[in-house]
Amino acid sequence: MPNKITQLFNIQYPIIQAGMVWASGWRLASAVSNAGGLGVLGAGSMYPEVLREQIQKCQKSTEKPFGVNVPMLYPDIDKLMDIIIDNGVKIVFTSAGNPKTWTAQLQEKDITVVHVVSSVKFALKAQEAGVDAIVAEGFEAGGHNGRDETTTLALIPAVKEKIDIPLIAAGGIATGRAMLAAMILGADGVQVGTRFVASEEASSHASFKQKVVEAGEGATQLTLKELAPVRLIKNKFYEEVQAAYAKGASVEELKNLLGRGRAKLGMFEGNMDDGELEIGQVSALIHDIKPAARIVTDLMSEFNLAKQEASTL
């Protein structure tokens, strides 16, 4: 289905796999790309040399385009960008920072740049910075979120009204019906995260994948807004955070409670009690773990069926 996004990335379907920390390694990224979407490596949880290895393994596993997501708060971002450029990656998603910092430098190397935003304000800043496309992410999404708590349903048409460049919708999209809805609202493609966490190829721990499958309605919550808003599964760690709030914890006390490596502990190492289990609200609609290629196929089948049904309304 050719459109602005498939043409921009030279892919078959306008489905982008989110570059999620501890889940988006080369196996997942290459599987999604081979299935016709755009696989993305999540560099936020990788040391520079690990990213180099992941890129090279991905290149050996697919001849199709794939990208790398780089949170701009990463302390060694210069090293990450050098590795991306040196290894010939042609698509970069930036997030959590000023898009002006890297967009021009990357584009000079013939790299397509996409920036992730959570508001119209930041979408306009990204467009002014010259990015090639925007991901607008509603606060239903897992992991770190915007402070405005704008839902995808409200965010996508608001951003579409103000920008001229291609728009990718994210947050709460795990089915073909949601994909169609997002595109009717004005998106040119969708970014899917939570559904791909529950895939066979995701690098996240098997216990975390199972936790996602078991999550029901209301299982996630946006919290720690004083630090960086994050949506996670309610577990023992979450209850400790809530207890700290009840006692009037300061920002410093919340930082100490969070500590370091909390997301790795849960999502990668499999500690379901003490880890930070970042996942989206749409986990309530996910009931199985299956191959990434099957997820892409199912999304497109559901999308086409929903489109046919919508035409009769």
Image (cartoon, rainbow, N blue to C red):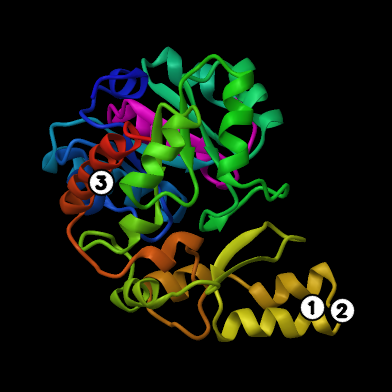
Disc 1 and disc 2 in contact, CB within 8 angstroms: yes
Vertical order, 294 against 101 (above or below): below
Label 1 residue SS: helix
- List x then y, in percent, for residue 221: 61, 68
Q: Secondary structure at mark 2?
A: loop
Q: Secondary structure at mark 3?
A: helix
Give the CA distance from mark 1 to mark 3.
42 Å
Q: Which residue is mark 3?
A: 302
Task: Report which residue position mark 2 lands on.
Answer: 248
Q: Are marks 1 and 3 in contact (CB under 8 Å)?
A: no
Could you tell me residue 199's position as x and y percent?
A: 25, 61
Which image quadrant: the C terminus? Answer: top left
Gap in angstroms between the C-alphas marked 2 and 3 = 47 Å
Residue occupying the point 54% across, 82% down:
235
At 16% from the left and 53% from the top, the residue drawn is 294
Q: Which residues are magenta?
A: 72-99
Looking at the picture, tell me which residue is in the foreground, 256 or 286.
286
Is residue 98 part of the magenta span, yes or no? yes
Residue that carries the numbered disc 1 in the rendered image: 245
Q: Is residue 299 above or below residue 66?
A: below
